[in-house]
Image: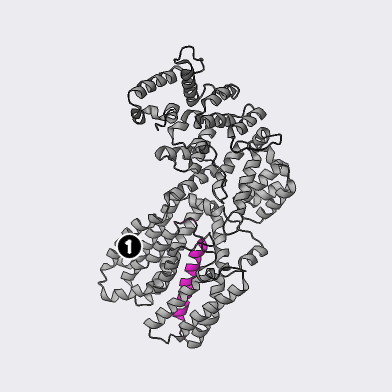
Amino acid sequence: MFRKYFKHIFSIIFFITVFLFWRLGYACAFSYHEQFQMFLFTKSYFLERMSLPGGLSDYISEFLVQFYYFPLFGSLIISGLLLVVQILSYQLMKCFSAKDFSYALSFLPSILLWRYLGNESVLLSFVVSCIAALIFDLGYVSTKKNILKILYASLGVALFYYFFGAIAFSSCLFFIVYDIKEKNNIIISVSAVLCSVFFALICYNLMNYQLFRFFVGINYFRFPMEIPLMQILIMFFLAVFPLLGLLEKKLNKKLSVSALVLIAVFGFFYVPGGFNELNYEVIEYDYLVRTGNWDKIISISEKKNPRTPQSVSCLNLALAEKGMLGDRMFNFFQNGGHGLIPSFVRDFFLPLSASEIYLRLSMVNSSLRNLFEAQEAIPNYRKSARITKRLAELNILNKDYLVAQKYLKMLSNTLFYKDFAEDLMENPEKLTQNKFWAEIDKSRYQKDFLFSESEPDQMFGLLLEQNEKNRLACDYLIAEVLLEKDLQKFINYYTVCQNVGYKVLPKHFQEALIYAYYKTHGNLSGIPPIVTAPVVNEFQQFMQIYSQNPQAVKNSPLSNSFYAYFFNLK
């Protein structure tokens, strides 16, 4: 019984493994990919995609990627596509008289693609094209009559190149490999190569793209001028891997299960190497900010300190949203004032989390600027549904209704943003009826002035002038001067906290006040009653340990204090 169904069992196990890997470990990747495209159900969108070689692959992949809006669907799509690659790979290997042992080897193309997808800039169109190439190869194997093979190797290859791009060269190489193995006349397969090269050159002369991109793929990778070596190796491997089926004739069939185990072990160690931890840290934090999952941000930061300015800024936003910034910010790694709002960079991804921070602080135009720059910086010139949605909302908030209508009209042709767009197209003022947007509209700047990114404390102060109950702005104002270790500004600013609504002054603010008072007076006699006894006791413990051995602070609970940060002892 096991012998009869073991192939199905292992394919199902593979599907489940891939699904759990993405769903539990890298769900954030789906949000990352979904937010950098905007699939439109319009004729013009379809024709735009079909205007380039590989256009059908782009169109299919972008149709699928829009479902990444829900990570569950994304995991199912990736798992399903890699399973299809494995099944088609095995079907090709059977054309080389392969059976049980080669079934294990048929997982290799899927494993290679799985690791390659770990690069967050790889587009799903490459996987779709690989599947199309495997199906195209099977069609060539199934074609027996010479006249049909000639049509397949000429007109068929030309059409395949135009629909799915440079992966056609992989299929042409497979044709040669297959004909040599079958001792067929290779003139037909060689003509397929010449036909595909000729058609690629025609496309090059008709379109304004670099020549090399017509031979390695135009839209397989997000960055137009970067073609990873891994992509070329996979394209080559898809053409020659069926030859591995010839090994089965020389091996014992009982090795098939052992081979599966070896392939599984290989995949276990090989696949994770394609996922850059730092890149995915930023991607995950941005995803959690997008979904407003503040508890999850704090939870993962407690397990592992964030290591990039963007991640730290997302953590600080989460702490502020939960009302814990002034009590817990020094429990985590901080990198100065940039840990609150990262410096602006011309990038398509990094400004997104900064724009959310600006938005929640009610700095509407700063958020708008970051979003617009990110939209225009997307490397493959796509438009982002996530960014377009925010741009529409912010333009409505600015009462630029005509601009907002243009964004909403685009979104009305999407699947998951359609209801949102149509609702606001009918009644733009409905946006400020929402409590979140109403609060932002109330707290935003009401007068024009010259914005200074180099003086964030002044910007936060102006927000408090507009709305003295804006706790988030107060938290950021005081946190900014503490991160910059500017005690004089802290003394000038901390009194504004009295109107924000703190029941007790946050712990780190108390620590700064205690140290500033001690530095000025030499003792704590007469310190304002706003500080609490436990925090005063902790300061005395800190000074005692610090006077004996400063480095000992690092190994004590006091390392999570403002004092430790001030003296660089974290």
Q: In the image, what residue occupies the spot 39% across and 82% down?
A: 180
What secondary structure is the stretch in magenta mostly built from? helix
Residue 436 location, x and y as percent?
A: 63, 37
Q: Which residues are magenta?
A: 118-144
Residue 297 location, x and y as percent?
A: 48, 40
Above/below status of 48 relative to 191: above
Q: Nearer the viewer, residue 493 or 250?
A: 493
On screen, residue 160 versus residue 400, left or right, reads left
Q: Nearer the viewer, residue 517 or 435?
A: 517
Mark 1: give few (<14), some (14-19) or many (20+) Cα within 10 Å: some
Q: In the image, what residue occupies the spot 31% across and 70% down?
A: 101
Q: In the rendered image, is residue 152 in sight?
A: no
Quadrant containing the C terminus in the rendered view: top left
Q: Secondary structure at mark 1?
A: helix
Q: In the rendered image, is residue 241 in sight?
A: yes
What residue does disc 1 label? 263
Q: Residue furthest top?
A: 526
- Quadrant of res 1: bottom left
Residue 199 location, x and y as percent?
A: 56, 77
